[in-house]
Image: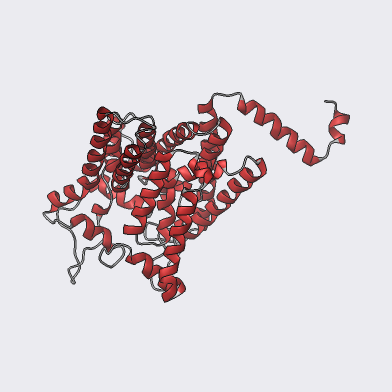
Amino acid sequence: MTGVEDGRRGPRALVRGQLQHWSKRLAGWPWWIQVVLVYALARLFSFCVFLAVARQQGPSPWGGAHPDYLSFIGIWDSAWYEQIYRRGYPEEIPRGLDGRALENQWAFYALFPALIRGLNALTGMPWQGLAPAVATVAGFVAALLIYRIFRLFAVHATALWGTVFVAVFPVAAILQVPYAESLNLALLAGSLYLVIRRRFLLAIPVVLMMCLSRPTGVPFAAMLGLYLLWRLRLRAEDPLDPGEFVRIATLGLVSCAGAVTWPVVAWMATGELRAYTDTETAWRGTDLIPFKPWYDMGTDLFGPIGGVLAPLVLLIAAVLVLTSATARRMGVELRLWCAAYLGYLFVFLHPQTSTFRLLLPLFPLALVASMASRSRAYRICLAAAFLALQIVWVTWLWSWAELPGGGDYPP
């Protein structure tokens, strides 16, 4: 194109032409390069957001004002994982004068800090550099596995956009900080991929590691139970031979065992049967009563009627999404996982600001969002909205700003 012809085109047309040019070039690259590229760009965006917010950060419980990037991402639960890495777990549950458990390391599963400790022994690298690096690499692995899952149910472009939505999700910045989220997401995606491909015995070690990274074992075991019932119901259309029945049941039993492994380890190490559950409830200040926290939060926000209606509305919305025609296109395994995980959250979760972070395991819904429309404008706008909300999340929740009564909202 000549300079005269180029000049006749408006700026909008030029931008559109460049986007189309690079889109065509990108489409010709191998799928894994495309996934790595979009995920790397997403993490670069999060890096810039962290840096910008860190410059505005005042003094916090973890250090002085205006911390550098590595110091800034090493706060909140990252500090708990670092304590485990350096000192392990307490032999006794610390308790206050009223006998209630105080916040301590037993609330955090061992796989992530153990992995960092092993790599430190091999490389000599310190926690501050090694832990974020491992978390970030695990995020890349998770992105690749998530794309492979999505590709089983959608064409390349739709699967890639679904992966983009996961990468830019408002809380996706957590995937590059020293939390166990990215490692758990990679192991969860690997477990689901193997279940979808019906490699049930091969999934056993992956599921066990997942159960030692974060508390996702209970909903995964529930999902497998529902999946087995589903296969029995449809055995006339999708034959279930005795061997496959045994393999599914074995994985389900292993998942159940994995789900209780960490509470049992805490019990054996401290001599207290309720060591893990008492520690978990230390953050909420009340005993673990199923469903009640949702009623309490709804009442606090919307009044007595809201205490009943708010959880009910959320439950109905979840059912409508998972039973929609679009969601049914992604396969029963992913829908059962989302249903089991949402059920787990409704039963056991104490809803608060950290709830946003706990939505990451619902990553299959990103594929639903991608399949909802093939419009490029829709997909770009949704990704842009997620990026904007990521700025809000880091600024509002990750950054420390002490409340009048002390403390801050946890991310």
The N terminus: image quadrant: top right
In the image shown, does 182 or 373 lie closer to the viewer?
373
* Residue at the image position 44 percent from the left and 55 percent from the top: 356
* Residue at the image position 47 percent from the left and 48 percent from the top: 323
Q: What colour scheme governs how the chains and residues are painted in the rendered image of this protein? A: secondary structure
Image location (x, y in percent) of residue 145: 43, 33
Image location (x, y in percent) of residue 32: 50, 27
* Residue at the image position 23 percent from the left and 38 percent from the top: 254
- In the rendered view, would you say 371 is above or below 302? above
Residue 268 shown left or right of residue 166 in the figure: left
The C terminus: image quadrant: bottom left
In the image shown, does 122 or 308 lie closer to the viewer?
308
Which image quadrant is residue 309 in?
Answer: bottom left
Which image quadrant is residue 139 in?
Answer: top left
- Circle count: 0
Residue at the farthest bottom position: 304
Residue 65 at least partly seen: no
In the image shown, does 49 or 185 lie closer to the viewer?
185
Image location (x, y in percent) of residue 189: 39, 37
Residue at the farthest left position: 271
Residue 329 at least partly seen: yes
- In the rendered view, would you say 352 is above or below 16? below
- In the rendered view, would you say 253 is above or below 83? above
Image location (x, y in percent) of residue 226: 33, 44
